[in-house]
Image (spheres, helix red, strand yellow):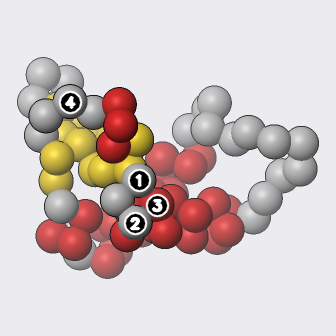
């Protein structure tokens, strides 16, 4: 189920994005980038609709996924 990111409190959204960008396997590229830049990139992708916040009822987890890979 897609959760509108606008429905989350700013603190919750920040925590969710930070958790997402700190996961193993989410850092791509030759140069390390500051956490703030990564968070800002994900926030921009959310505002442009490129990624969505998804709640998994089966796993009881929340994730950020590319909109194109989520089938609602």
Give the SS element for disc 2.
loop
Residue drawn at the location 67% of the way across and 68% of the way down:
37
The residues tagged by marks 1 and 2 sit, at their Cα atoms, a distance apart of 6 Å
Q: Is residue 37 left or right of residue 14?
A: right
Say which mark, if any, is on residue 45: 3
**Image quarter hosting the N terminus:** top left
| Label 3: how many Cα within 10 Å (few below 14, some 14–19, many 20+) | some
Vertical side of 37 occupied by 54: above or below? above
Image x and y of residue 24, in percent: 62, 32
Circles 2 and 3, Cβ within 8 Å, touching? The answer is yes
Circles 1 and 3, Cβ within 8 Å, touching? The answer is yes
Vertical side of 52 occupied by 9: above or below? below
The residues tagged by marks 4 and 1 sit, at their Cα atoms, a distance apart of 14 Å
Count the marks: how many?
4
The residues tagged by marks 1 and 3 sit, at their Cα atoms, a distance apart of 5 Å
Image x and y of residue 34, in percent: 75, 64
The residues tagged by marks 2 and 3 sit, at their Cα atoms, a distance apart of 5 Å
Give the SS element for disc 4.
loop
The image quarter containing residue 30 is top right
Residue drawn at the location 18% of the way across and 40% of the way down:
55
Residue drawn at the location 74% of the way across and 39% of the way down:
28
The residues tagged by marks 4 and 3 sit, at their Cα atoms, a distance apart of 18 Å
Q: Is residue 72 left or right of residue 37?
A: left
Circles 1 and 2, Cβ within 8 Å, touching? The answer is yes
Image x and y of residue 17, in percent: 45, 58
| Label 2: how many Cα within 10 Å (few below 14, some 14–19, many 20+) | few
Report which residue position mark 1 lands on.
50
Residue drawn at the location 27% of the way across and 33% of the way down:
70
| Label 4: how many Cα within 10 Å (few below 14, some 14–19, many 20+) | few
Circles 4 and 3, Cβ within 8 Å, touching? The answer is no
Report which residue position mark 2 lands on.
48
């Amino acid at each position: 189920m897609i959760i509108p990111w606008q429905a989350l409190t700013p603190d919750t959204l920040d925590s969710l994005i930070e958790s997402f960008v700190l996961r193993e396997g989410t850092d791509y590229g030759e140069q390390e980038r500051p956490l703030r830049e990564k968070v800002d990139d994900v926030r921009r992708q959310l505002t442009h609709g490129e990624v969505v916040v998804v709640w998994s009822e089966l796993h009881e987890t929340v994730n950020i996924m590319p909109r194109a890979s989520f089938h609602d």
